[in-house]
Image: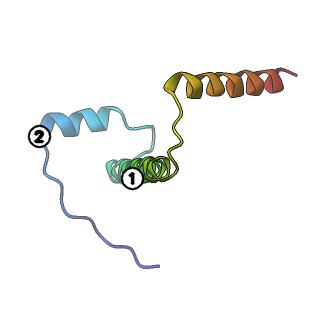
Amino acid sequence: MKTATMPSLRVDPELRQEAERVLHEGESLSSFMEQTLRAGIRSRRAQQEFIARGLASQTEARATGEYFSADDVLADMAGLLAQAENKARG
């Protein structure tokens, strides 16, 4: 697969220095930028999917008239967490 280039990124010298200071041994600034871009894309996709699920849930709740209180949802989540912790322990 052929590679493509990204547009040049102009930044303040201080930002470049900060980026260079956090590089791992043997890591290039280019590989750091690629990794950061990939992480940003994953984060944006997850955010978009989260919003889409929320909007779909809102639509379903309006259509069915079935709503759940935050207290009930949090109690259910606490129960699931307790089950998972118990399972992990033994």
C-alpha separation, residue under disc 1 versus residue under disc 2? 30 Å
According to the picture, the residue beneath numbered tag 1 turns out to be 48
According to the picture, the residue beneath numbered tag 2 turns out to be 12
Q: Is residue 58 left or right of residue 21?
A: right
Closest to the observer, 48 or 18: 48
Closest to the observer, 67 or 45: 67
What is the x, y in percent for residue 69? 51, 28
Q: Residues within 10 Å of mark 2 (few under 14, many from 20)?
A: few
What is the x, y in percent for residue 10? 13, 51
Q: Quadrant of the C terminus?
A: top right
Q: Secondary structure at mark 1?
A: helix
Q: Which mark is residue 26?
A: none
Occupied quadrant, residue 41: bottom left
Q: Secondary structure at mark 2?
A: loop
Residue at left offset 25%, top offset 32%: 18
Q: Amino acid at mark 1?
A: Gln
